[in-house]
Amino acid sequence: MYDFQRLELYILSPISGAALDNQVIMEAKSFISEIVYALELAMLVGLFMSASSMESVAKAMQSIPNRNLDGVTNTELMQTAEGLSLFVDKLPFIRTINGYTISPKGTRLPANLTIGMHLKYWKFHRDLPASRVFAFGESASSATIPGPTIIAMSGVKTYILWENFLPNEHIFTVDNTLETAKPNAGVPTVVHLHGGVTEPESDGSALAWFTNGFRERGERWRKAVYLYHNAAETGTMWYHDHALGYTRLNLLAGLIGAYKIVNPRLENEFRLPQGEFDQMLVVMDRSFTKDGQIYINSTGIRPEIHPQWQPEYYGNVIVVNGKAWPYMEVQRRKYRFRIINASNARYFNF
Ligand SMILES: [Cu+2]
């Protein structure tokens, strides 16, 4: 637990000319130690939330009229959020998958990865029943929220077969009056690498969606195995679903994961923390019903036009690396934090 209010922000020089990279160093004093966080912002907009500012969010949420939202009230959602003790779950270190291989001679070579999208149950908090989610992973049992962090090597290609194992029915209400992907059955998905410099046929066009087993495909679908050139020198990015009309729901369900391009020469030059000290923080807000399910109001703000459409989503529980209000044990040394705001609409303050 740190008092993030005391963070100070310093801008270091960008490590490359690429617009994707801004190196930011934040210096923080905690009751344990003085630690330095390095934050790499990759086209990410938003600030991040402190433990102490969560109370003010809770108060602001309470001022929202307590409409009857398809049987679930804001009071119930707030009670669920307030019932969760802060800092009881340990911050998970998201599993990493290398997007490259190393030959016996030490040459870095392209890797072929297979990552699926699975329905599973996920514990967001010690005291919350498991929630139904959609999650990225190599199998349903290993799938996580967020999905595995892919570590790509600058200049070395990564091939990924993205597979859809999702059920016929979505876990949220789909508004079919909107312009959406319209398969006969199943949940349409397609993966976009946010911040990537990617060839069009691998870029996750909203119209390149596909359902379970590629049974149905959108008009822009071209191929199953996506190619990432990893042309940037370094970068912190994220991958997420991008299917037409489904993106907000599929991300809310959990189809989010981090992706970083590394360049050992540059990172060594700047002596940046590596391994467990190079920590990805994927931040997202979610509301939960008392039985632990992710909640989105499906009554629509203009139900006479679009019965389920909600333009934005604000949840009242802050989730980092898949756990609500986690804590992190740190050593007395430098850490690098790569913070991704994967919320729909919420911005964060330190
Ligand atoms: Cu994006």
Image (cartoon, rainbow, N blue to C red):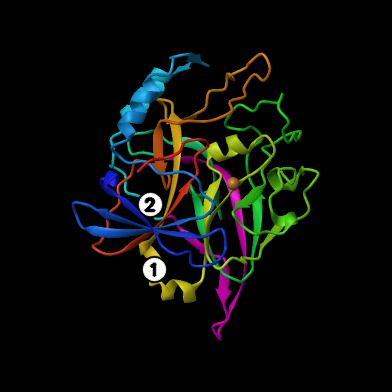
- At which x and y percent is residue 177? 72, 24
Task: Report, in whole angstroms, how far the alpha carbon at label 2 lies from the one at label 1.
Answer: 21 Å
Does residue 101 belong to the magenta stretch? yes
Q: Quadrant of residue 199?
A: bottom right
Res. 224 visible in picture: no
Question: Can residue 211 be found in the magenta stretch?
Answer: no
Residue linked to disc 2: 92
Q: Kindly identify the residue that appears in the image at 73 percent across and 36 percent down.
A: 181
Dividing the picture into quarters, in which one does residue 118 lie? top right
Mark number, residue 272: 1
Q: Residue at 43% x, 14% y: name it.
A: 66
Give the residues drawn in magenta, as a range.
94-122
Please tell me which residue is depicted at 74% across the width and 55% down the height of the picture. Answer: 200
Residue 87 position within the rendered picture, expressed as x and y whole percent measured from the top left: 28, 42
Q: In this view, does 102 lie above or below 59?
A: below
User: Residue visible at 27% across and 57% down?
Assistant: 330
Residue 218 seen from this side: yes
User: Is the magenta region chiefly helix, strand or loop?
Assistant: strand
In this view, the residue farthest toward the bottom is 105
Quadrant of the snapshot with the C terminus: top left
> In the visual, does 82 lie left or right of 224?
left
**Residue contact at pointers 2 and 1, CB within 8 angstroms:** no
**Percent of width and height locating residue 269:** 42, 75
Amino acid carrying mark 2 in the image: Pro
Q: Which amino acid does label 1 sit on?
A: Leu
Q: Nearer the viewer, residue 175 or 292?
A: 175
Neighbor class of circle 2 (other Cα within 10 Å; few <14, some 14-19, many 20+) is: some
State left or right for residue 32 relative to residue 49: left
* Left or right of 241, for residue 141: left
